[in-house]
Image (spheres, coloured by chain):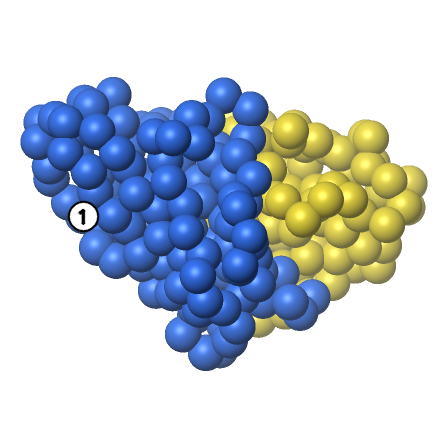
Chain colours: A blue, B yellow
């Protein structure tokens, strides 16, 4: 149980275009989802907290107009990287709060974004 | 912000126990210690968590010191597939998980 599906697993896009990444909770409802970014050989950095039916809360230094988050249902959150640039190339990972103690967070398999 | 410190890297011989330490000296009374691991280019995988008592499951054991300022994750019989980055996380009073730098464990044949 508590499976999070992330799609796509990898994407290549041209500079200036936008890319949407989906995060779905498959067998549970997730009122809260989280988006992380991970650069090579670095740890996961929390970007934002996504709450169903309300605006996302962004961590300091993360541009909310560039990284659009939508959490319109209890099983789906999307992250859209707008006007992507090569420096946005990274590994993006979502996670969802299961609402139960164990495991408190379940993570998706990640999306490798390459901007060329 | 991450509230834990871990060694950057460790090696362990295959079949031996891997003991991964974590310091969390500022932990408060209601904060749990969680351990996740990340195999290259995958999402983090839950291992174990605890509050005060030692915990054991099919993957690992978690030993928490009496003062709760540090803990050790034990993989009893490390295999090559246990090679990964291991993250010790103290969940704060908010809802978020903040990752530290983790320990890169290499299991050597």
Q: Is residue A16 left or right of residue B11?
A: left
- Please name the residue shown 62% across and 61% down the image: A104
Whether residue A79 appears in this view of the structure is yes
Picture quarter with the N terminus of chain B: top right
Q: Which residue is labeled 1 in the image?
A: A10
Q: Nearer the viewer, residue A12 or B104?
A: A12
Secondary structure beneath label 1: strand
Q: Is residue B11 visible?
A: no
Callout 1: chain: A
Q: Nearer the viewer, residue A47 or B37?
A: A47
* Crowd band around label 1 with a 10 angstrom C-alpha radius: few (<14), some (14–19), many (20+): few
Residue sitting at x 67%, y 49%: B95
Residue A90 screen position, x and y as percent: 28, 33
Question: In the rendering, at what x and y percent does residue A63 appear?
Answer: 42, 26
In the displayed structure image, the side of residue B54 where residue B83 appears, left or right = left
- Residue A31: % across, % down: 57, 63
- In the displayed structure, A85 sits above or below B43; it is above
The quadrant holding residue A68 is top left
Residue B49 occupies which quadrant of the picture?
bottom right
Q: Could you tell me which residue is drawn at 55 percent across and 31 percent down? A: A59
Horizontal arrangement in the rendering, residue A11 relative to residue B101 (left or right): left
Q: Nearer the viewer, residue B32 or A84?
A: A84
Q: Name the one closer to the observer, B31 or A13.
A: A13
Q: How many marks?
A: 1
User: Where is residue A8 drawn, in percent x and y?
Assistant: 21, 55
Q: Residue at x 82, y 30 (%)?
A: B26
Q: Is residue A78 left or right of residue B23?
A: left
């Amino acid at each position: 149980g508590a499976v999070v599906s992330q799609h796509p697993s990898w994407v290549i896009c041209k500079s200036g275009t936008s890319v949407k990444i989906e995060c779905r909770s498959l067998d549970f409802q997730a009122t809260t989802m989280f988006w992380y970014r991970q650069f090579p050989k670095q740890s996961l950095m929390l970007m934002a907290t996504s709450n169903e039916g309300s605006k996302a809360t962004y961590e300091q230094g993360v541009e909310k107009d560039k990284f659009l988050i939508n959490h319109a249902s209890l099983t789906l959150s999307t992250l859209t990287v707008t006007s992507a640039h090569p420096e946005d190339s990274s590994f993006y990972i979502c996670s969802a709060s299961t609402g139960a103690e164990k495991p408190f967070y379940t993570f998706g398999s990640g999306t490798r974004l390459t901007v060329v | 912000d991450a509230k834990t410190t871990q060694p950057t890297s460790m090696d362990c011989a295959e079949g031996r126990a891997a003991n991964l330490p974590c310091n969390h000296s500022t932990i408060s009374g209601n904060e749990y210690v969680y351990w996740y691991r990340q195999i290259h280019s995958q999402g983090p995988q839950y291992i174990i968590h605890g509050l005060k008592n030692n915990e054991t499951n099919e993957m690992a054991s978690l030993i928490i010191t009496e003062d709760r300022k540090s803990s050790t994750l034990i993989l009893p019989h490390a295999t090559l597939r246990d090679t990964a980055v291991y993250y010790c996380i103290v969940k704060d009073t908010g809802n978020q998980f903040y990752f530290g730098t983790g320990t890169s464990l290499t299991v050597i044949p």
